[in-house]
């Protein structure tokens, strides 16, 4: 467990990455035993926590930013030494003051030498310049290497079982991103006044419920809990870094806890308390200090920015974003009234808030198939804030994952003398790998993502003769050679074979020779769609694409001029609310043409026809291994058989029986689809698909 300790904060503006490079030659990690220091002798004694301490294998990092912290360091270290949780790693960030080494660092070193076993994981960094709060925090978060981390103020106190209980909470709740104390005890130092407050209860359940709960509360939960650092589906990465706000000290924590809620559940622990030490002097001078350092305009901009970030984070998960926006604007004004005594024109804050939410160029991708997900990555390349919306529960969950994943080079279109479709398919196939790698920003090993090369079989009943197919292959080869010459950077899934159709071969032994007229070896392959989906899903997470599932799109319409300037040009209407965007991309399957017509993009009033194509996937059975190669029975209503490697699945379909025509009533699509998913096929389906393959393959 990593513990991050910040000793208050300064007001510098240097980039934390610059600081990281600067302190590489200065940091005081594990100070030597014989290094002398001058400080008043401390009677820390040899106090030991007399409780039996178990050995904890899950490390926790605690980060601590320090500012004028010497009066509190001793009590802080005593608090940490008395923790029943033993696997603590401490990271301190000290101020660049001239005497800092002689105070805070000396005290820390004394504790390390006095209890080396307990504090051997102590790291100390001296700031070359004073950092602003969130910059210092991001610097420390960048040093965290453990899965769990936490943060505390140097002048606060903890119950002895604090970290043990919170780590146990995270370990036993896999969906949790933050476990925190439900009760905070505030102690005013000078008057010894004690106030106890119960903070936000656990936020669990679906993401929209968590967001609704957390976004409505300005809470400092992330500063008191233990946070899971592992990558989360939200796309916020491993560190939950603080946003770069202008000069807002407390509001940035509210943005951070909302990130936690989007990524997972927040669990309030009833078994521990956090003791917050407050000083009357600090309270009385807080507003004066803020006025002295920042002017009203700076605070207005920073506050509006903070609440705009909360709005933009929660936007896709709330039912009524417009009502939510008005609430955020009111919260921003309330925050300013608490921060500053002088009057502000609150309309200016409102205008600044809406200007900042509109700085996010917001794009909605309708549909989470391969087209929609790749379109989302393309928009992220250009700096857009992207949301994918789909009725499914995962990306590429239907057609994109259930087909054979064939990357066509044009061989299927031998009955088209114009060669137009074949040319388009071939050129697209040659760009497929390059564009995928560009979007995911990664060089891929395509040998692990594709099937064996397909053998093209021409039945006697094919629409083209073997001679016609060979002539077509020569024409296709000429187009392929031109593409190779004009685009030396392009490959067909990592390779540049000399031809598309490599030549005639013997009819495979597993094939019924009386059914097949000729066989040809091609370079065409099929993609392992499930593995490609994993790569795309990870890229969407890393790039921060918002994924909204289990939501049905009902329509899209244009906003009026006033709403367009304030919220966005287009409004997407779903079964869970209405949301505004600057750009909407229609990548749906069902209702695609209907939505296009709503926007005036398609005036064709003809009803669409839909089909569900069924296929069979099964384990690579031993009796099939080595007997049937990957094949495609060409130019007619036949079938395919694809092997994806020794350890992967096999796929086969028989086209005369696999498509199921769907009525024009789209409400029946989902019912029919689900029946097929759970194999409730028509009674004769399995019989016909097997009989069709028996006609082509001896082994069946």
Image (cartoon, grey):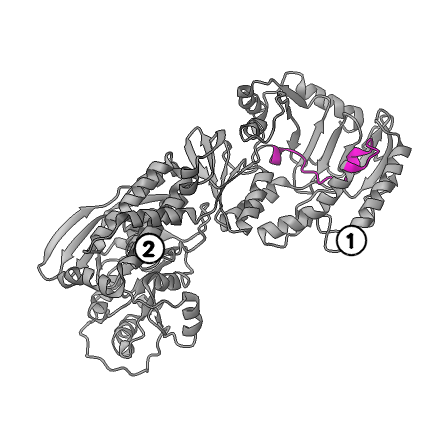
Depicted 465 relative to depicted 453: above or below: above
Depicted 519 relative to depicted 354: above or below: above
Residue 416, quarter of picture? top right
Q: Residue at x 31, y 46 (%)?
A: 350
> Going by the image, does 581 lie left or right of 127?
right
Magenta includes 76?
no
Q: Residue furthest left?
A: 191
Q: Residue at x 76, y 55 (%)?
A: 488
Q: Secondary structure at mark 1?
A: helix
Q: Position of residue 299 (x, y in %)?
A: 29, 57
- Out of 420 and 192, give the one closest to the viewer: 420
Q: Position of residue 180 (x, y in %)?
A: 29, 49
Q: Quadrant of the N terminus?
A: bottom left
Q: Residue furthest top?
A: 683
| Residue 502 visible, this orientation | yes
> Going by the image, does 270 lie left or right of 495?
left
Magenta includes 417?
yes
Instruction: Tell me where the magenta segment starts and ends, as one range.
Output: 399-420
Residue behind mark 1: 486
- Out of 464 and 511, give the one closest to the viewer: 464
Q: Secondary structure at mark 2?
A: helix
The disc placed on residue 301 is: 2
């Amino acid at each position: 467990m990593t513990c991050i300790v910040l000793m208050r904060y300064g007001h510098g503006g240097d980039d934390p990455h610059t600081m990281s490079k600067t302190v590489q030659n200065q940091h005081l990690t594990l100070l030597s035993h014989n290094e002398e220091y001058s400080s008043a002798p401390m009677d820390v004694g040899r106090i030991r926590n007399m409780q039996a301490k178990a050995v904890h294998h899950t490390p926790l990092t605690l980060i601590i930013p320090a500012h004028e912290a010497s009066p509190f360091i001793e009590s802080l270290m005593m608090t940490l030494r008395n923790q029943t949780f033993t696997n603590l790693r401490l990271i301190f960030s000290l101020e660049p003051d001239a005497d800092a080494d002689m105070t805070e660092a000396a005290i820390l070193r004394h504790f390390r030498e006095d209890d080396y076993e307990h504090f051997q994981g102590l790291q100390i960094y001296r700031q070359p310049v004073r950092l602003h709060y969130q910059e210092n925090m991001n610097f420390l978060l960048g040093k965290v290497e453990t899965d769990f981390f936490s943060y505390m103020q140097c002048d606060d106190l903890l119950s002895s079982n604090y970290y043990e209980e919170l780590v146990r909470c995270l370990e036993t709740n896999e969906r949790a991103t933050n476990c925190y104390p439900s009760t905070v005890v505030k102690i005013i130092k000078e008057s010894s006044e004690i106030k106890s407050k119960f903070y936000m209860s656990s936020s669990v359940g679906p993401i929209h419920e968590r967001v609704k709960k957390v976004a409505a509360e300005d809470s400092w939960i992330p500063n008191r809990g233990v946070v899971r650092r592992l990558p989360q589906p939200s796309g916020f990465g491993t560190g939950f870094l603080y946003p770069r706000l202008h000069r807002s000290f407390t509001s940035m924590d509210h943005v951070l806890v909302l990130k936690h809620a989007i990524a997972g559940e927040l669990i309030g622990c009833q078994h521990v308390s956090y003791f917050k030490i407050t000083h009357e002097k600090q309270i009385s001078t807080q507003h004066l200090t803020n006025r002295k350092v920042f002017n009203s305009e700076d605070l207005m901009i920073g506050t509006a920015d903070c609440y705009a970030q909360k709005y933009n984070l929660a936007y896709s998960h709330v039912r009524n974003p417009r009502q939510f926006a008005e609430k955020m604007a009111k919260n921003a004004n309330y925050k300013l009234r608490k921060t500053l005594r002088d009057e502000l024109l609150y309309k200016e804050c409102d205008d600044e808030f809406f200007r900042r939410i509109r700085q996010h160029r917001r794009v909605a991708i309708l549909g989470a198939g391969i087209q929609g997900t790749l379109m989302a990555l393309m928009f992220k390349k250009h700096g857009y804030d992207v949301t994918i919306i789909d009725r499914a529960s995962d990306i590429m969950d239907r057609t994109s994952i259930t087909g054979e994943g064939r990357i066509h080079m044009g061989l299927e279109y031998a009955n088209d003398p114009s060669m137009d479709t074949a040319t388009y398919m071939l050129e697209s196939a040659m760009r497929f790998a390059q564009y995928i790698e560009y979007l995911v920003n990664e060089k891929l090993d395509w040998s692990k993502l594709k099937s064996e090369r397909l053998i093209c079989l021409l039945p006697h009943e094919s629409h083209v003769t073997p001679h016609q197919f060979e002539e077509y292959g020569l024409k296709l080869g000429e187009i392929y050679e031109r593409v190779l010459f004009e685009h030396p950077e392009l490959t067909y899934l990592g390779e540049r074979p000399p031809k598309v159709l490599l030549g005639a071969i013997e009819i495979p032994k597993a094939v019924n020779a009386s059914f097949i007229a000729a066989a040809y070896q091609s370079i065409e392959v099929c993609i392992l769609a499930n593995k490609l989906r994993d790569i795309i899903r990870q890229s969407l997470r890393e790039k921060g694409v918002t994924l909204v599932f289990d939501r049905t799109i009902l329509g899209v319409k244009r906003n009026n001029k006033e709403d367009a300037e304030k919220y966005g040009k287009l409004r997407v209407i779903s079964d869970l609310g209405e949301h505004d965007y600057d750009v909407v991309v229609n990548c749906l399957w069902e209702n695609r043409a209907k939505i296009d017509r709503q926007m005036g993009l398609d005036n064709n009033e003809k009803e669409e026809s839909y089909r569900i194509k069924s296929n069979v996937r099964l384990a690579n059975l031993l009796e099939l291994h080595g007997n049937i190669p990957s094949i495609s029975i060409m130019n007619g209503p036949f079938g395919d058989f694809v092997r994806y490697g020794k350890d992967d699945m096999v796929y086969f379909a028989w086209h005369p029986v696999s498509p199921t025509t769907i009525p024009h009533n789209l409400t029946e699509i989902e019912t029919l689809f689900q029946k097929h998913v759970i194999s409730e096929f028509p009674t004769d389906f399995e019989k016909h698909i097997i009989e069709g393959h028996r006609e082509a393959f001896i082994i069946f």
